[in-house]
Image (cartoon, rainbow, N blue to C red):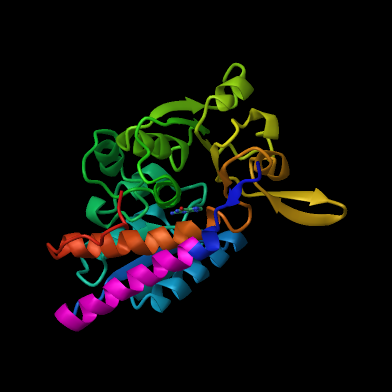
Amino acid sequence: MTARVIDGKAFAAGVRAQVAAHVARLAEERSIVPGLAVVLVGEDPASQVYVRNKGIQTKEAGMASFEHKLPAETPEAELLTLIDRLNADPAVHGILVQLPLPGHMNAEKVINAISPAKDVDGFHILNVGLLGTGQKAMVPCTPLGCLMMLRDHHGSLAGLNAVVVGRSNIVGKPMAQLLLADSCTVTVAHSRTKDLAEVCRGADILVAAVGRPEMIRGDWVKPGATVIDVGINRVERDGKTRLVGDVDYAGAAAVAGAITPVPGGVGPMTIACLLANTLTACCRAHGLAEPEGLTA
Ligand code: GUN
């Protein structure tokens, strides 16, 4: 079997188009413009690239983009004051503080200072609790993107065996909660799981989010399974730097029913879902119906 390749780039473009259409309607019918504030502390080069891309795509969707760049040595109290100001600003519907933060800052404290209703990353402890108890939450962007692609491919996920490899707060744990809420039978595995290969072989849906290049081998994949590869790893090969996922793509694609490539799979969905979350936060703030198909 050769797997269907799930084109995340095209899927993300579709999500962005849906968001943009909804944003245009909000502007025309209600004069409402959703706004996203992104805060970057320091000069981490990868973070600068992410923040720039977020700003570009936010504006392309017709939303307002507010960028706040602070020096690395900014005192934590100053960042907390900025967050308070953004929490109170009615033009700001979503707030994202780019991680990682400099070492002198307490990331948990900073994240939990964001108003939960504006927490478009879904990292605030209240949103974590709401998601875990099946209540309406802001949902982390990467797992939300994975869920959208899975629903699109399968329709209903009910009764499917899902194995999530990785237990991070940003991907693994919320992914497991979302799959459980869609009535999958969920196993959360990780680098210390005994006989990980055998656990993976039981998966109808296999989500790899461990951060280890090509760790999931082709013969760990059940024939016909759907493989979602969240990994983005830089490796040196033949003297060149290449991006690879957490899955051995060629091996897995030969047996899977569907698979996301790296790059061009899950990656583009993250910012698309950030825009979707900003729109959702805006609709909720104004007591309007949420955009269909763009929430968990
Ligand atoms: N840094 C890398 N990915 C992310 C993300 O999804 N959200 C935030 N806030 N920071 C990040």
Q: Is residue 76 left or right of residue 251?
A: left
Q: Residue at x 49, y 66 (%)?
A: 51
Residue 183 is situated, as x and y percent measured from the top left of the image, at: 32, 33
Asked whether 30 or 36 is in front, the reply is 30
Does residue 263 appear in this view? yes
Does residue 70 appear in this view? no
Please, which residue is most extreme toward the right here? Answer: 238
**Main secondary-structure element of the magenta-colored stretch:** helix
Q: Residue at x 32, y 38 (%)?
A: 182
Residue 286 forms part of the magenta stretch: no
Q: Is residue 103 left or right of residue 62?
A: right
Q: Residue at x 35, y 69 (%)?
A: 18
Q: Quadrant of residue 242?
A: bottom right
Residue 20 forms part of the magenta stretch: yes
Asked whether 35 or 6 is in front, the reply is 6
**Vertical relation: 52 (above or below) 262:** below
Please, which residue is most extreme toward the front here? Answer: 1
In the rendered view of the protein, which quadrant contains the N terminus?
A: top right
**Vertical relation: 173 (above or below) 144:** above
Q: Quadrant of residue 49?
A: bottom right
Q: Is residue 227 left or right of residue 63?
A: right
Question: Which range is magenta?
Answer: 11-30
Asked whether 76 or 147 is in front, the reply is 147
**Vertical relation: 153 (above or below) 169:** below
Asked whether 260 or 210 is in front, the reply is 260
Count every numbered label the image shows and give the total: 0
Q: Residue at x 58, y 46 (%)?
A: 259
Residue 68 is situated, as x and y percent measured from the top left of the image, at: 41, 69
Please, which residue is most extreme toward the top here? Answer: 194
Residue 58 is situated, as x and y percent measured from the top left of the image, at: 40, 72
Q: Is residue 113 left or right of residue 166?
A: left
